[in-house]
Image (cartoon, coloured by chain):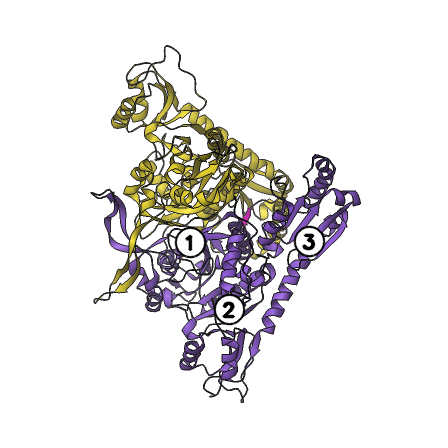
Chain colours: A purple, B yellow
Amino acid sequence: MAKDRRAGITPRAEDYARWYLEVVQRAELADYAPVKGCMVIKPYGYAIWEAIQRTLDGMIKETGHVNAYFPLLIPVSFLQKEAEHVEGFAMECAVVTHSGLYKDEDGRLRARGELEEPLIVRPTSETIIWHTVRNWIQSWRDLPLLLNQWANVMRWEMRPRLFLRTLEFLWQEGHTAHATHQEAREETLRMLGVYRRLLEEHFAIHVVAGRKSEAEKFPGALSTFTVEAMMQDGRALQAGTSHDLGQNFSRAFEVTFQDRDGTLQHVWTTSWGVSTRLVGALVMAHGDDSGLVLPPRLAPVQVVVVPFLRRPEDRARVEPALARLVDGLRAQGVRLHVDARDHVSPGAKFYEWEGKGVPLRVELGPREVERGEVVEVRRYDGRRRALSLEAFVQGVVPALEEIQRDLLVRHRAFTEARLHRCQSYAELQDVIEGDRGWVLAWWCGGAPCEARVKEQTKATIRCIPLEGEMPGAAARCIVCGEGAAERVVFARAY
Amino acid sequence: MAKDRRAGITPRAEDYARWYLEVVQRAELADYAPVKGCMVIKPYGYAIWEAIQRTLDGMIKETGHVNAYFPLLIPVSFLQKEAEHVEGFAMECAVVTHSGLYKDEDGRLRARGELEEPLIVRPTSETIIWHTVRNWIQSWRDLPLLLNQWANVMRWEMRPRLFLRTLEFLWQEGHTAHATHQEAREETLRMLGVYRRLLEEHFAIHVVAGRKSEAEKFPGALSTFTVEAMMQDGRALQAGTSHDLGQNFSRAFEVTFQDRDGTLQHVWTTSWGVSTRLVGALVMAHGDDSGLVLPPRLAPVQVVVVPFLRRPEDRARVEPALARLVDGLRAQGVRLHVDARDHVSPGAKFYEWEGKGVPLRVELGPREVERGEVVEVRRYDGRRRALSLEAFVQGVVPALEEIQRDLLVRHRAFTEARLHRCQSYAELQDVIEGDRGWVLAWWCGGAPCEARVKEQTKATIRCIPLEGEMPGAAARCIVCGEGAAERVVFARAY
């Protein structure tokens, strides 16, 4: 007997981590691979990633960047050239030590051909890129150099989780060089803005944009900027980061240019990236106890049509209306799927497409055809209504836009309701330990206070919001009570 | 003093290998990376690869396939499950043995955290895919399963060459499963047909499609099919392959399905791929002694406009015409670049864009504006003519189409003139050793005859053409003189 495909998903309130895994698997987004911590991205999950790529690639090119490709393997010695960088990544590098295999006496495959210098599988590409690119830059006329790469990277993860933390993940990494620090800083913030727009306009996810504390910044950066999104369990997810790298990498790799005045200067560099973890963000920001809920702009299928064609006489009556519906939607560029499988019941189809988060479902049977109607069901709020086939076709694009907007409004309201402005450490502990959301609080800027919060509550400083207030004279650090320097967001994070 | 950027390219007739390298570097397509055999794909080269990807991805999806992503790292034991497969790839695998680095007493980074089982960086993904996908298939209703993946793969190469043979390369690999051998065979040939269309219609490269001999087929395949293209030095380049894998991998990984009659069967699988070596094929099929020559459909820039704006009074006169020209081309979706750099002379610009193979160059200066004209120069044959700005704009799309057609006609004629129908072994030796092209000849089907040709002339059987003749009674093997089974193409190859 076949497995019951309609076994329910664990409710979020019961076990959030389990709910997440079940939604990912039910929607056929991804699964674990045989190598622990690696992930297979299944076709439906990959189609979402392709939609993200298409959208973001366009935004990256519009801002003047070009794509290139740098090698997967990096000599170990490169990593060592930037002191903080090596500290940050050495412990989690996959290391290639041999270039072949042979069969031993028992017929088992063993590594042969030991390499002179071990190679690492890139955890990020600053070192290999700046080593290479120094030859592309001679004068100020060659700047800015605005590169991006779509690639796989690898960081050995001890506690993997599909999309959120996997040993291998897919991402884009932008790398740029500039003649002045000011230009590099502008670039860092420009790309942070691109990520914010990507998240808000396409993912319908509200984010808080800010700067990382010294303890949380990228190894090798002067400053790291981030967009942080609140998941439904109140935790933060770092959705994208943009780094002002100063001259740290250009000094380590001797990337210089001749300036207008004839002097030789080191370039100022940036890097910025988002990854397949954004698919996990989609799941956790919008999903519900029936499964995935996709924003229309990133949905591989925006409208699924379920025609009722079981009896031969139904087929003859339904098919002409179905053809009109399909033609009408295609003409508007709507991404459409007609689920005409005859060995699956309508109920099972509804359940499957609900799990996959398709924004709109349309039901079309003999009764609807008789009335000249279709039944429309919205995924995100379950609203069900009958309307004329023509009205549905005419209204489908605005309806998808409305859903897109509504999802952002809902997620923004969700976030703001759980962003607690706390005055005392007890309040902070209450919010964090009760999983009630994020804490917005004054901080003295001191590492000991930051470390104490982390140790006692597992919350970290997610960011110092860009749209922050200046501290008044009365502003006191929520930990030590001394004069405050900045207002920060504390939260537990993925 | 700056290097002379206009130093000539070595002529093809003088040193073909050197010409190739210089064209690739002059056009800024790629360069060698610090790890021997690895390649950096520079923005202009990557833009060509993006055009190839965009085109082929559309063709792959039109034929019903979906993209997915499988892990980079594969347990060594998987490779061993298919006997021929492991023989074919074991010697050239990059092996990951450790999961971190530590600093030794001298401060040098060394590998730590030895893995229980070594992992290989995928040289191709049959093993990891069929291990995973067996769980996706239960019944005949789940078939055919039509997957594709865009990925990087790695094969340790002893004699690397940019694009043609690199340790890491980018490719797509299709993997499909079918209920019957006939369907799998049809799929294999369908995708070979897609590659043939890709090469002929987009690359303007004539190919010979055929089947590989037993000695030359993919390790683990029942049959391998190939499209072979002739380079300008008369050598063959295997441009794409499509494999009928029979049940070899489904038996090795126990991929079964319940058939309509209720019995449990092994699926029949195929795989097929093309890679970044196609960029090398473009260079070697069309390039000339001035550099790259790109077919318009794959050219990142189809038209480059060089306005003469040196003197302020020129600028005022040229700019209105330039704006009309740009608007006219953009409106037709032409990929356009205006090279308005004021620190580079027109001659240096011509030289640079010639080297980059841009199909059409347009010159627009005060003299042209006065006459209401532009000067158009075609890259592939150097034809230069003045015509009215309006006529150029109106005729640009047909002109690009004509260039696309002409390049294919030229390459087809080139190939056919060098495809020698040989009757004797001496003739064969003459053609091959004189680098005069390919040999079409009868072959008995025996491995010793094939091996003898390879040993004595370094030519291999490139394929048994699909559009072959049946051997008549008089057909004799060109090597041993016995009765012939098939007509084959012998050639030296990249």
Say which amino acid is labelled 3.
Answer: Val
- The quadrant where residue A452 appears: bottom left
- The quadrant where residue B462 appears: top left
Q: Is residue B368 left or right of residue A144?
A: right
Element class at badge 2 = strand
Of all residues, the one furthest to the front in this rendering is A1
Give the residue pinned by disc 2: A236
Residue displayed at 38% across by 20% down = B487
Residue displayed at 40% across by 65% down = A267
Q: CA distance from mark 1 to mark 2?
A: 24 Å
| Disc 2 and disc 3 in contact, CB within 8 angstroms | no
Is residue A460 depicted above or below B319 in this figure?
below
1 and 3 marks on the same chain: yes
Give the residue pinned by disc 1: A152
Say which amino acid is labelled 2.
Answer: Ala
Q: Earlier in the sequence, mark 1 or mark 2?
A: 1
Magenta residues, start to end: B334-339
Of the numbered discs in the image, which one, if any, rests on residue A377? 3
As for residue B14 lying within the magenta part, the answer is no
Q: CA distance from mark 1 to mark 3?
A: 38 Å
| Disc 1 and disc 2 in contact, CB within 8 angstroms | no
- Tell which subunit mark 3 falls on: A
Q: CA distance from mark 2 to mark 3?
A: 31 Å
1 and 2 marks on the same chain: yes
Element class at badge 3 = strand
Q: Position of residue A331 (x, y in %)?
A: 69, 44
Q: Position of residue B175 (x, y in %)?
A: 45, 40
